Protein backbone atom coordinates (compact mmCIF):
# COMPACT_ATOMS: atom_id res chain seq x y z
CA UNK A 1 0.00 0.00 0.00
CA UNK A 2 1.33 3.42 -0.86
CA UNK A 3 0.54 6.79 0.61
CA UNK A 4 -2.65 5.66 2.32
CA UNK A 5 -4.10 4.82 -1.07
CA UNK A 6 -5.74 1.68 -2.21
CA UNK A 7 -3.81 -1.57 -2.09
CA UNK A 8 -3.02 -3.28 -5.38
CA UNK A 9 -6.18 -4.70 -6.89
CA UNK A 10 -7.12 -7.51 -9.19
CA UNK A 11 -10.15 -7.51 -11.45
CA UNK A 12 -11.41 -10.74 -12.89
CA UNK A 13 -14.57 -11.58 -14.84
CA UNK A 14 -15.63 -15.23 -14.78
CA UNK A 15 -18.27 -16.61 -17.14
CA UNK A 16 -20.33 -18.95 -14.98
CA UNK A 17 -23.96 -19.65 -14.03
CA UNK A 18 -25.17 -18.27 -17.35
CA UNK A 19 -23.80 -14.83 -16.54
CA UNK A 20 -20.54 -13.17 -15.62
CA UNK A 21 -19.21 -12.78 -12.09
CA UNK A 22 -16.87 -9.82 -11.66
CA UNK A 23 -14.32 -9.75 -8.86
CA UNK A 24 -12.62 -6.67 -7.40
CA UNK A 25 -10.23 -8.22 -4.92
CA UNK A 26 -6.72 -7.72 -3.53
CA UNK A 27 -4.00 -8.58 -6.02
CA UNK A 28 -2.69 -11.27 -3.68
CA UNK A 29 -5.87 -13.33 -4.28
CA UNK A 30 -3.98 -15.03 -7.07
CA UNK A 31 -4.87 -16.54 -10.40
CA UNK A 32 -8.41 -17.72 -11.26
CA UNK A 33 -6.98 -21.10 -12.26
CA UNK A 34 -4.61 -21.28 -9.29
CA UNK A 35 -4.69 -22.44 -5.71
CA UNK A 36 -5.24 -18.97 -4.24
CA UNK A 37 -8.49 -17.49 -3.01
CA UNK A 38 -9.63 -16.37 -6.45
CA UNK A 39 -9.15 -19.88 -7.75
CA UNK A 40 -11.16 -21.27 -4.84
CA UNK A 41 -13.94 -18.78 -5.47
CA UNK A 42 -14.07 -19.57 -9.18
CA UNK A 43 -14.17 -23.32 -8.52
CA UNK A 44 -16.94 -22.79 -5.95
CA UNK A 45 -19.08 -20.92 -8.48
CA UNK A 46 -18.61 -23.63 -11.12
CA UNK A 47 -19.55 -26.25 -8.54
CA UNK A 48 -22.71 -24.30 -7.73
CA UNK A 49 -23.50 -24.11 -11.44
CA UNK A 50 -23.01 -27.87 -11.92
CA UNK A 51 -25.11 -28.66 -8.87
CA UNK A 52 -27.90 -26.08 -9.05
CA UNK A 53 -28.38 -25.22 -12.71
CA UNK A 54 -31.90 -25.98 -13.94
CA UNK A 55 -30.49 -25.95 -17.47
CA UNK A 56 -28.22 -28.95 -16.92
CA UNK A 57 -29.96 -32.31 -17.02
CA UNK A 58 -27.38 -33.85 -14.71
CA UNK A 59 -27.53 -31.19 -11.97
CA UNK A 60 -28.96 -32.10 -8.60
CA UNK A 61 -31.66 -29.48 -9.12
CA UNK A 62 -32.77 -31.00 -12.43
CA UNK A 63 -32.68 -34.56 -11.16
CA UNK A 64 -34.47 -33.69 -7.94
CA UNK A 65 -37.03 -31.64 -9.85
CA UNK A 66 -37.66 -34.57 -12.18
CA UNK A 67 -38.15 -36.87 -9.19
CA UNK A 68 -35.33 -39.16 -10.23
CA UNK A 69 -33.36 -38.71 -7.00
CA UNK A 70 -34.29 -38.04 -3.40
CA UNK A 71 -33.10 -35.02 -1.45
CA UNK A 72 -30.80 -37.31 0.54
CA UNK A 73 -29.07 -38.34 -2.68
CA UNK A 74 -28.25 -34.72 -3.56
CA UNK A 75 -25.55 -32.40 -2.28
CA UNK A 76 -26.46 -31.37 1.30
CA UNK A 77 -26.47 -27.75 0.17
CA UNK A 78 -29.68 -28.42 -1.78
CA UNK A 79 -31.58 -29.12 1.44
CA UNK A 80 -30.12 -25.95 2.91
CA UNK A 81 -31.29 -23.95 -0.10
CA UNK A 82 -34.77 -25.48 -0.05
CA UNK A 83 -35.21 -24.62 3.59
CA UNK A 84 -34.06 -21.05 2.98
CA UNK A 85 -36.38 -20.65 -0.03
CA UNK A 86 -39.32 -21.74 2.13
CA UNK A 87 -38.35 -19.21 4.80
CA UNK A 88 -38.14 -16.35 2.29
CA UNK A 89 -41.43 -17.51 0.77
CA UNK A 90 -43.14 -17.30 4.15
CA UNK A 91 -41.63 -13.90 4.93
CA UNK A 92 -42.65 -12.51 1.54
CA UNK A 93 -46.28 -13.67 1.72
CA UNK A 94 -45.65 -16.26 -0.94
CA UNK A 95 -44.18 -13.86 -3.48
CA UNK A 96 -40.92 -15.79 -3.47
CA UNK A 97 -40.94 -19.45 -4.42
CA UNK A 98 -38.52 -22.20 -5.45
CA UNK A 99 -41.04 -23.25 -8.10
CA UNK A 100 -41.66 -20.14 -10.22
CA UNK A 101 -43.96 -20.99 -13.08
CA UNK A 102 -44.53 -24.42 -11.57
CA UNK A 103 -41.07 -25.78 -12.30
CA UNK A 104 -38.50 -26.48 -9.59
CA UNK A 105 -35.89 -23.73 -9.98
CA UNK A 106 -34.34 -22.19 -6.85
CA UNK A 107 -32.09 -19.89 -8.95
CA UNK A 108 -33.73 -16.83 -7.39
CA UNK A 109 -32.01 -17.78 -4.16
CA UNK A 110 -28.93 -19.62 -5.38
CA UNK A 111 -27.23 -16.81 -7.25
CA UNK A 112 -27.09 -14.33 -4.39
CA UNK A 113 -26.13 -17.09 -1.98
CA UNK A 114 -23.31 -18.27 -4.23
CA UNK A 115 -21.95 -14.74 -4.66
CA UNK A 116 -22.11 -13.92 -0.96
CA UNK A 117 -20.30 -17.15 -0.12
CA UNK A 118 -17.67 -16.38 -2.74
CA UNK A 119 -17.14 -13.00 -1.06
CA UNK A 120 -16.81 -14.72 2.32
CA UNK A 121 -13.92 -16.80 0.97
CA UNK A 122 -11.88 -13.63 0.52
CA UNK A 123 -12.79 -12.40 3.99
CA UNK A 124 -11.71 -15.74 5.44
CA UNK A 125 -8.41 -15.40 3.60
CA UNK A 126 -7.75 -12.06 5.29
CA UNK A 127 -9.11 -9.52 2.80
CA UNK A 128 -10.96 -6.63 4.43
CA UNK A 129 -11.94 -4.84 1.21
CA UNK A 130 -13.39 -6.58 -1.83
CA UNK A 131 -16.51 -6.86 -3.93
CA UNK A 132 -18.09 -9.53 -6.09
CA UNK A 133 -20.74 -8.73 -8.70
CA UNK A 134 -22.77 -11.62 -10.06
CA UNK A 135 -24.68 -10.51 -13.13
CA UNK A 136 -25.69 -7.19 -11.59
CA UNK A 137 -26.07 -8.23 -7.95
CA UNK A 138 -23.22 -6.96 -5.82
CA UNK A 139 -21.71 -7.87 -2.46
CA UNK A 140 -19.31 -5.26 -1.09
CA UNK A 141 -17.11 -6.08 1.89
CA UNK A 142 -15.45 -3.41 4.00
CA UNK A 143 -14.57 -0.09 2.44
CA UNK A 144 -13.50 0.46 -1.14
CA UNK A 145 -10.21 1.70 0.23
CA UNK A 146 -9.00 3.85 3.12
CA UNK A 147 -11.77 6.37 3.81
CA UNK A 148 -13.63 5.52 0.63
CA UNK A 149 -17.09 4.08 0.20
CA UNK A 150 -18.03 1.66 -2.55
CA UNK A 151 -20.01 3.40 -5.29
CA UNK A 152 -22.55 1.27 -7.11
CA UNK A 153 -24.44 2.53 -10.15
CA UNK A 154 -28.06 1.46 -10.45
CA UNK A 155 -28.89 0.75 -14.08
CA UNK A 156 -31.93 2.54 -15.46
CA UNK A 157 -34.14 -0.12 -17.05
CA UNK A 158 -36.02 2.44 -19.13
CA UNK A 159 -32.86 4.08 -20.52
CA UNK A 160 -30.54 1.15 -21.09
CA UNK A 161 -26.90 2.05 -20.88
CA UNK A 162 -27.52 4.81 -18.35
CA UNK A 163 -27.67 4.88 -14.60
CA UNK A 164 -30.73 5.92 -12.62
CA UNK A 165 -28.64 6.87 -9.60
CA UNK A 166 -25.54 5.95 -7.64
CA UNK A 167 -25.53 4.50 -4.13
CA UNK A 168 -22.56 4.30 -1.83
CA UNK A 169 -21.78 2.39 1.32
CA UNK A 170 -19.61 -0.14 3.05
CA UNK A 171 -20.29 -3.76 3.99
CA UNK A 172 -23.47 -3.84 2.00
CA UNK A 173 -25.20 -5.73 -0.76
CA UNK A 174 -27.09 -4.25 -3.71
CA UNK A 175 -29.43 -6.43 -5.77
CA UNK A 176 -31.67 -5.38 -8.62
CA UNK A 177 -34.49 -7.38 -10.13
CA UNK A 178 -36.05 -6.48 -13.40
CA UNK A 179 -36.77 -7.75 -16.82
CA UNK A 180 -33.48 -9.13 -18.03
CA UNK A 181 -32.38 -8.88 -21.62
CA UNK A 182 -34.11 -11.80 -23.33
CA UNK A 183 -34.20 -13.53 -19.97
CA UNK A 184 -37.14 -15.01 -18.18
CA UNK A 185 -39.65 -12.68 -16.68
CA UNK A 186 -40.29 -12.85 -12.98
CA UNK A 187 -43.55 -14.62 -12.32
CA UNK A 188 -45.99 -13.46 -9.68
CA UNK A 189 -46.62 -16.80 -7.93
CA UNK A 190 -50.10 -15.69 -6.92
CA UNK A 191 -51.27 -15.11 -10.48
CA UNK A 192 -48.89 -17.24 -12.53
CA UNK A 193 -48.39 -14.22 -14.77
CA UNK A 194 -45.30 -12.08 -15.35
CA UNK A 195 -45.05 -9.23 -12.86
CA UNK A 196 -45.52 -5.91 -14.67
CA UNK A 197 -45.90 -3.12 -12.08
CA UNK A 198 -42.19 -2.38 -11.87
CA UNK A 199 -39.47 -1.95 -14.45
CA UNK A 200 -36.90 -2.72 -11.78
CA UNK A 201 -36.47 -2.74 -8.04
CA UNK A 202 -33.19 -2.44 -6.18
CA UNK A 203 -32.83 -3.70 -2.62
CA UNK A 204 -29.94 -2.79 -0.31
CA UNK A 205 -29.13 -4.92 2.71
CA UNK A 206 -26.23 -6.43 4.62
CA UNK A 207 -25.79 -9.75 2.81
CA UNK A 208 -26.48 -10.56 -0.82
CA UNK A 209 -28.21 -13.89 -0.19
CA UNK A 210 -31.33 -12.38 1.36
CA UNK A 211 -30.99 -9.02 -0.35
CA UNK A 212 -31.18 -10.71 -3.75
CA UNK A 213 -34.05 -12.99 -2.75
CA UNK A 214 -35.95 -9.99 -1.37
CA UNK A 215 -35.39 -8.09 -4.61
CA UNK A 216 -36.92 -10.98 -6.54
CA UNK A 217 -39.89 -11.11 -4.17
CA UNK A 218 -40.30 -7.32 -4.30
CA UNK A 219 -40.39 -7.35 -8.09
CA UNK A 220 -43.08 -10.04 -8.10
CA UNK A 221 -44.97 -8.04 -5.46
CA UNK A 222 -44.98 -4.90 -7.58
CA UNK A 223 -46.65 -1.85 -6.06
CA UNK A 224 -46.99 -3.58 -2.69
CA UNK A 225 -43.24 -3.97 -2.37
CA UNK A 226 -42.68 -0.54 -0.89
CA UNK A 227 -44.60 -1.22 2.31
CA UNK A 228 -43.18 -4.72 2.51
CA UNK A 229 -39.54 -3.60 2.34
CA UNK A 230 -40.31 -0.83 4.86
CA UNK A 231 -41.30 -3.60 7.25
CA UNK A 232 -37.93 -5.37 6.88
CA UNK A 233 -35.35 -4.21 9.41
CA UNK A 234 -32.06 -3.33 7.73
CA UNK A 235 -33.30 -3.31 4.14
CA UNK A 236 -34.12 -0.40 1.83
CA UNK A 237 -35.49 -0.31 -1.70
CA UNK A 238 -35.64 1.91 -4.76
CA UNK A 239 -37.95 1.11 -7.66
CA UNK A 240 -38.67 2.44 -11.11
CA UNK A 241 -42.19 1.67 -12.20
CA UNK A 242 -43.16 0.53 -15.66
CA UNK A 243 -44.66 3.98 -16.22
CA UNK A 244 -41.37 5.69 -15.47
CA UNK A 245 -42.06 7.08 -12.00
CA UNK A 246 -39.98 5.98 -9.04
CA UNK A 247 -40.17 5.51 -5.30
CA UNK A 248 -37.84 4.66 -2.47
CA UNK A 249 -38.24 3.47 1.10
CA UNK A 250 -37.86 5.97 3.91
CA UNK A 251 -34.15 5.50 4.68
CA UNK A 252 -32.92 4.69 1.19
CA UNK A 253 -31.65 8.26 0.94
CA UNK A 254 -28.88 7.44 3.38
CA UNK A 255 -27.21 5.46 0.59
CA UNK A 256 -27.47 8.09 -2.13
CA UNK A 257 -24.01 9.06 -3.27
CA UNK B 1 -36.49 13.08 -7.16
CA UNK B 2 -32.84 12.29 -7.06
CA UNK B 3 -32.47 10.42 -10.29
CA UNK B 4 -29.26 11.35 -11.97
CA UNK B 5 -28.65 10.37 -15.51
CA UNK B 6 -25.15 9.12 -15.81
CA UNK B 7 -23.41 7.36 -18.57
CA UNK B 8 -20.10 5.62 -18.78
CA UNK B 9 -18.03 3.84 -21.30
CA UNK B 10 -20.14 0.76 -21.71
CA UNK B 11 -22.94 2.94 -22.91
CA UNK B 12 -21.74 2.91 -26.43
CA UNK B 13 -21.81 -0.83 -26.65
CA UNK B 14 -24.92 -0.98 -24.53
CA UNK B 15 -26.98 1.18 -26.77
CA UNK B 16 -25.81 -0.49 -29.90
CA UNK B 17 -27.20 -3.73 -28.60
CA UNK B 18 -30.58 -2.12 -28.19
CA UNK B 19 -30.96 -0.49 -31.52
CA UNK B 20 -32.47 -2.26 -34.45
CA UNK B 21 -29.24 -2.93 -36.16
CA UNK B 22 -29.09 -5.76 -38.57
CA UNK B 23 -26.19 -8.10 -38.58
CA UNK B 24 -23.88 -7.44 -41.44
CA UNK B 25 -22.57 -10.94 -41.32
CA UNK B 26 -18.98 -9.97 -40.70
CA UNK B 27 -17.02 -12.81 -39.24
CA UNK B 28 -15.15 -11.62 -36.19
CA UNK B 29 -13.32 -13.74 -33.72
CA UNK B 30 -13.31 -12.61 -30.11
CA UNK B 31 -10.32 -10.52 -29.23
CA UNK B 32 -8.87 -10.34 -25.79
CA UNK B 33 -8.84 -7.06 -24.00
CA UNK B 34 -5.54 -5.36 -23.67
CA UNK B 35 -4.22 -2.36 -21.87
CA UNK B 36 -1.07 -0.85 -23.13
CA UNK B 37 1.10 1.59 -21.32
CA UNK B 38 2.44 4.89 -22.49
CA UNK B 39 2.01 5.59 -26.13
CA UNK B 40 2.34 2.11 -27.51
CA UNK B 41 -0.33 0.74 -29.75
CA UNK B 42 -3.22 -1.40 -28.67
CA UNK B 43 -2.20 -4.94 -29.18
CA UNK B 44 -5.03 -7.29 -28.60
CA UNK B 45 -7.30 -7.10 -31.52
CA UNK B 46 -7.22 -9.67 -34.24
CA UNK B 47 -9.61 -7.48 -36.11
CA UNK B 48 -7.73 -4.24 -36.47
CA UNK B 49 -8.46 -2.60 -39.76
CA UNK B 50 -12.01 -3.80 -39.96
CA UNK B 51 -13.20 -0.31 -39.21
CA UNK B 52 -11.95 1.17 -42.43
CA UNK B 53 -15.35 1.07 -44.06
CA UNK B 54 -16.80 2.81 -41.02
CA UNK B 55 -14.52 5.75 -41.54
CA UNK B 56 -15.90 6.47 -44.93
CA UNK B 57 -19.55 5.61 -44.56
CA UNK B 58 -20.63 7.05 -41.23
CA UNK B 59 -20.90 10.79 -40.84
CA UNK B 60 -20.45 12.47 -37.50
CA UNK B 61 -17.98 14.30 -35.30
CA UNK B 62 -16.66 11.29 -33.51
CA UNK B 63 -13.57 9.18 -33.94
CA UNK B 64 -13.88 6.03 -35.95
CA UNK B 65 -11.05 3.58 -36.10
CA UNK B 66 -8.23 2.99 -33.70
CA UNK B 67 -6.74 5.94 -31.86
CA UNK B 68 -3.78 3.89 -30.74
CA UNK B 69 -1.42 5.67 -33.10
CA UNK B 70 -2.56 9.14 -32.04
CA UNK B 71 -1.86 9.15 -28.34
CA UNK B 72 -0.21 11.92 -26.42
CA UNK B 73 2.05 11.35 -23.44
CA UNK B 74 0.24 9.97 -20.41
CA UNK B 75 -2.54 8.35 -22.37
CA UNK B 76 -3.21 4.65 -22.46
CA UNK B 77 -5.45 2.53 -24.62
CA UNK B 78 -7.97 -0.06 -23.52
CA UNK B 79 -9.38 -2.09 -26.39
CA UNK B 80 -12.52 -4.02 -25.61
CA UNK B 81 -13.42 -7.49 -26.71
CA UNK B 82 -15.45 -7.76 -29.86
CA UNK B 83 -18.98 -8.13 -28.66
CA UNK B 84 -20.91 -10.37 -31.03
CA UNK B 85 -24.36 -9.02 -30.38
CA UNK B 86 -27.34 -10.35 -32.26
CA UNK B 87 -27.14 -7.17 -34.31
CA UNK B 88 -23.55 -7.71 -35.33
CA UNK B 89 -20.10 -7.18 -33.84
CA UNK B 90 -19.36 -4.18 -31.64
CA UNK B 91 -15.94 -3.13 -30.42
CA UNK B 92 -15.05 -0.09 -28.38
CA UNK B 93 -11.69 1.45 -27.60
CA UNK B 94 -11.09 3.77 -24.65
CA UNK B 95 -8.28 6.26 -24.29
CA UNK B 96 -7.48 6.79 -20.64
CA UNK B 97 -5.53 9.45 -18.81
CA UNK B 98 -5.09 9.29 -15.07
CA UNK B 99 -7.76 6.59 -14.90
CA UNK B 100 -10.28 8.80 -16.66
CA UNK B 101 -11.71 8.20 -20.07
CA UNK B 102 -10.75 11.04 -22.37
CA UNK B 103 -11.79 9.55 -25.72
CA UNK B 104 -13.92 6.74 -26.98
CA UNK B 105 -13.41 5.20 -30.39
CA UNK B 106 -15.70 2.81 -32.17
CA UNK B 107 -13.68 0.11 -33.89
CA UNK B 108 -16.62 -1.99 -34.94
CA UNK B 109 -20.28 -1.32 -35.27
CA UNK B 110 -22.95 -3.19 -37.11
CA UNK B 111 -23.88 -1.50 -40.32
CA UNK B 112 -24.51 -2.50 -43.84
CA UNK B 113 -27.86 -1.01 -44.54
CA UNK B 114 -29.05 2.55 -44.86
CA UNK B 115 -31.04 2.02 -41.70
CA UNK B 116 -27.94 1.02 -39.75
CA UNK B 117 -25.96 3.99 -40.99
CA UNK B 118 -28.71 6.43 -40.06
CA UNK B 119 -28.91 5.04 -36.55
CA UNK B 120 -25.15 5.02 -36.20
CA UNK B 121 -24.88 8.65 -37.20
CA UNK B 122 -27.50 9.60 -34.68
CA UNK B 123 -26.46 7.48 -31.76
CA UNK B 124 -22.72 7.43 -31.55
CA UNK B 125 -21.90 11.14 -31.24
CA UNK B 126 -24.51 11.59 -28.55
CA UNK B 127 -23.35 8.62 -26.57
CA UNK B 128 -19.70 9.43 -26.77
CA UNK B 129 -20.42 12.94 -25.58
CA UNK B 130 -22.34 11.61 -22.61
CA UNK B 131 -19.58 9.19 -21.83
CA UNK B 132 -17.05 11.96 -21.53
CA UNK B 133 -19.18 14.42 -19.63
CA UNK B 134 -20.22 11.95 -16.99
CA UNK B 135 -16.87 10.35 -16.45
CA UNK B 136 -16.45 12.19 -13.19
CA UNK B 137 -19.10 10.02 -11.61
CA UNK B 138 -16.75 7.26 -10.63
CA UNK B 139 -18.43 4.01 -9.84
CA UNK B 140 -17.01 0.66 -8.86
CA UNK B 141 -19.77 -1.65 -10.00
CA UNK B 142 -23.22 -1.69 -11.56
CA UNK B 143 -26.39 -3.25 -10.20
CA UNK B 144 -29.10 -4.04 -12.68
CA UNK B 145 -31.33 -6.78 -14.00
CA UNK B 146 -29.25 -9.81 -14.76
CA UNK B 147 -27.45 -10.01 -18.03
CA UNK B 148 -26.64 -13.26 -19.73
CA UNK B 149 -23.08 -14.28 -20.37
CA UNK B 150 -23.51 -13.09 -23.95
CA UNK B 151 -25.08 -9.83 -22.84
CA UNK B 152 -22.26 -9.03 -20.45
CA UNK B 153 -20.07 -7.70 -23.22
CA UNK B 154 -22.52 -4.89 -23.85
CA UNK B 155 -22.96 -4.13 -20.16
CA UNK B 156 -21.67 -1.19 -18.19
CA UNK B 157 -20.00 -3.66 -15.85
CA UNK B 158 -17.85 -5.02 -18.65
CA UNK B 159 -16.48 -1.55 -19.29
CA UNK B 160 -15.66 -1.18 -15.60
CA UNK B 161 -13.90 -4.53 -15.56
CA UNK B 162 -11.82 -3.47 -18.53
CA UNK B 163 -10.95 -0.19 -16.86
CA UNK B 164 -9.56 -2.06 -13.89
Image (tube, coloured by chain):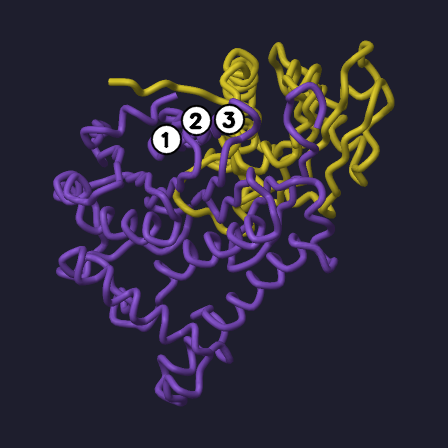
Chain colours: A purple, B yellow
Are the residues under badges 1 and 3 in a single subunit? Answer: no
Quarter occupied by residue B4: top left
Q: Residue at x 27, y 50 (%)?
A: A214
Q: Which mark is residue A232?
A: none
Name the element at disc 1: loop
Give the label, 1 or 3, closer to the camera: 3
Verify CB contact (< 8 Å) between mark 3 and mark 2: no
Read off the chain for label 1.
A
Q: Residue at x 13, y 58 (%)?
A: A93
For mark 3, what is the residue?
B139
Quarter occupied by residue A25: top right
Residue A65 place in picture, x, y as percent: 35, 79
Give the label, 3 or 2, closer to the camera: 3
B122 with respect to A93 (left or right): right
For mark 2, what is the residue?
A162
Residue A181 versus residue A61: which sits nearer the camera? Answer: A61
Q: Which mark is residue A156?
A: 1
Residue A127 place in picture, x, y as percent: 59, 44
Q: Residue at x 53, y 41 (%)?
A: A131
Amino acid sequence: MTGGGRAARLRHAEHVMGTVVSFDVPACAGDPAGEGTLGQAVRWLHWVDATFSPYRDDSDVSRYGAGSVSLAQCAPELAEVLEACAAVGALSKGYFTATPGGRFDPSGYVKGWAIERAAVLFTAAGSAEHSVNGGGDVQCVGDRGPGQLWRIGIADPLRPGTLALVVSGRDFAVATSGVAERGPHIINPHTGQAATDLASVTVIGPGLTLTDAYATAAFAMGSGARDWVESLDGYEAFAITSRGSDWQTSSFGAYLA
Amino acid sequence: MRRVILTIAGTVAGLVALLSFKSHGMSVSPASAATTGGTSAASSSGTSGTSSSSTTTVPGEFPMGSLAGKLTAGETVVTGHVGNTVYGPVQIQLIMRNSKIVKVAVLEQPMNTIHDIQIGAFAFPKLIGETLTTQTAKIDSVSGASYTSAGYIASLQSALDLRG
